[in-house]
Image (cartoon, helix red, strand yellow):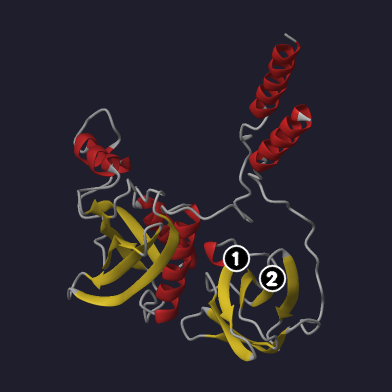
Amino acid sequence: MKLIGLTVFVIFILTGCSKSVEPDSSIVKVIDGCGNSDINIIDIKGLKKADGFMQAQVIGENSSNSYQVLEYRVVWLDKDGFKIESILSKWNRVPAYENQPFHINAISPSTRAKTFRLYIKRDKEVICDKQYNGQ
Amino acid sequence: MRQTIQWTIILGITGFLLSGCATKTTNIDMNNDRGEAVMGLDYRDFQGAAQDMIKSLISSGAVSKKDGSRYVLAVSRVVNDTMQHIDTDQLVKKIRVGLLRSGKVVVTTAVGAKGAEDKMAMKTRKELRGNEEFDQKTVAGKGRMIAPDLSLSGKILQRNIRVDSSTQRVEYYFQMSLTDIKTGLAFWEDERVIGKRGSNKSVAW
């Protein structure tokens, strides 16, 4: 009886000891269309400013009844379609309040940018992947 | 006797298994780090702050010259007013790289708040000029260095607030200014605040 109790105690200690140092990197799920979830993209536009930088504005809507923190990143591409390396293409956060629109404003890292590609994710799941081609 | 043996075996197994619990060292995926937040400042905070500052600087138009040429930027002092040992270059370097890549700014390493950042540029000029061992056509002549137009300065502040007996809040303020050297006017200024809430036992320095 004592032995069973001790075994249970040891297992209990050991389970408390398991520590995930690196989170599980599950495969990212991509959904096309940006309208299949409670996060919808309403408008996406790009503008070449007078100083040569490109400005992007994306308007989305959180149609759920809960506040969400979304992560987004904008990948900027030059005229040949090559990615422009920049810290500005790292994941960033945007608040999406319940049943309200949210705005993402981005600026190109250099004047070479011609188009951009937007990715939005919630946790590990990419819920939107949209490209603006200047049209 | 039998009980003693039982205890010895149990404790032996427990010890063996617990030793396997030691945290394993792994490389962090810097592009998708889902690790727990820390009370102190980590690379994600500096990256976020730098991202926001570069975005704000470029959007403001303060680094875009009307004639399309590039501004020369000198990096002034960025004060670390936190309780942590921070090399402010963790922030400043990212901003410099971002601005340089924008094609609108070039950074001078010949002028800085504490003298030239790259001592060699100044030293070689002085030591090689007039030195017969060197072809004087290849030595930088007088009056060739470009003076800076803009100066980047800033401050990182920390405030610790006790929420209750077990919780504390730590606020970090990243403040930056871009000054036009000729006029002394600040062309651009911005601030980013990072707040963290955690245990009182966590030390934020």
Instruction: Give the amino acid type for the residue marked by disc 2 in the picture.
Output: Lys
Q: Find numbered disc 1 in the image and state the secondary structure of the residue it sits on.
A: loop
Q: Quick one: label 2 or label 1, which is nearer the N terminus? A: 1
Q: Nearer the viewer, mark 2 or mark 1?
A: 2
Give me the C-alpha separation between circle 2 and circle 1: 9 Å
Residue for badge 1:
A91
Q: Chain of mark 1?
A: A
Q: Nearer the viewer, residue B22 or A26?
A: B22
State which quadrant residue B183 falls in. Answer: bottom left
Report the disc number at residue B146: none
Q: Residue at x 75, y 74 (%)?
A: A127
Q: Nearer the viewer, residue B121 or B80?
A: B80
Mark 1 surroundings within 10 Å by alpha-carbon count, few (fewer than 14), some (14 through 19), many (20 or more): some
Give left or right: position of A10 versus B38.
Answer: right
Instruction: Give the amino acid type for the residue marked by disc 1 in the picture.
Output: Trp
The answer to whether any part of residue B117 appears in the image is yes
